[in-house]
Amino acid sequence: MAYVQIESDDRMEEGPQSLQFQSFLSTDARAASPLGNVGSNAARGYIPDSGASRSSGFWTLEYYQPYFDVDTKTVLRRCYTTLLPTSSSYLSAHLTPAADLYGPFWTLTTLIFALFVFSSLASSIAAYLSSGGSSPSTAEIEYDFGLLSTAVAIVYAYGLGVPVLLWLALRYMGVGEWSVVEAISVWGYGQFVWIPVTLLCVIPVSLVRWILVGVGFLVSGYFVGANVYPILATADAKPVRLVIVLLGLLHAGIALCFKILFFSYYAVKQEGPSDPLPVSLRL
């Protein structure tokens, strides 16, 4: 057996760049393996995630999926904290690490069905009281299913359309301190107070209903104003801050719509103090 002396090659000390690795897997096996290209990709500074982080267009469901990835406990906490006035911003205190669309969607949808169901219940109570305490016939109780479509139009237009339009207007005026998802999240969670208000408005006392609607207007209005005005205050043009006045008037109009369209049922026999609403506006 012959031995050949091999001199040391200094090129082995140049580093890992001079090393070459060969895969003995077939081309099909490398393509089927999720880590088949890790070696070449790692040299470029990244490792593929099998398409999990690929960007999707806004017209696809994958684009909106992260905004609905929230647990029930978080949604409930974000709902009831809207009833507690705090000095801190709702965006930074509760919508962290990110705002969601799941909670606002179900808050607005629940409000729609609450308006229709409790409004129909208030109508039944008014018919019962008008009959003198006896059971009214089915002909005396008429359920207006048109109120359901009215509730859908009003609630979704205010809870979704207004924040989107406001965000677009602020972007046009150069005020980009929040995203459209954060705007919808603030508006959607801000309407949560109307759900218990609609439940209590089945009480057949008109003055009590007005007080409840007023409380709902103040609580939800304060919540929206406290979170929107700091955004408006960042604008260079001072008149932009007057947008909060327009939003307040719009919010008052929504409160009146809830009272007049859904909870203006009256018994023939007056219950409680007289209603300040003119007779011509009563249902």
Image (tube, helix red, strand yellow):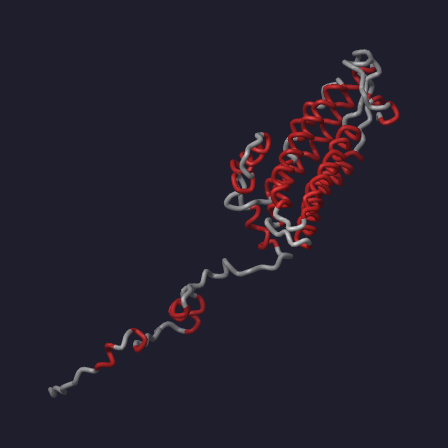
- From this viewpoint, which residue is outermost toward the right? 280
Q: Is residue 129 left or right of residue 244?
A: right
**x, y percent for residue 281:** 85, 27
Q: Where does the C terminus fall, quadrant-wise?
A: top right
Q: Quadrant of the N terminus?
A: bottom left
Question: Where is 181 relative to 213, above or below?
Answer: below
At x 44% / y 66%, what residue is drawn? 32
Residue positioned 56% across, 36% down in the render: 78
With respect to residue 239, does 251 lie above or below? Answer: above
**Is residue 196 depicted above or below 64 in this figure?**
above
Question: Residue 123's x, y, as percent?
Answer: 78, 23
Q: Quadrant of residue 272?
A: top right
Q: Quadrant of residue 133?
A: top right
Residue that appears at 78% across and 14% down? 271
Total residue callouts: 0
Q: Does any portion of residue 61 appear in the rendered image?
A: yes
Work out whether 23 lies above or below 148: below
Image x and y of residue 233, in percent = 63, 45
Residue 119, position in %: x, y?
75, 27
* Residue 37 visible (yes or no): no
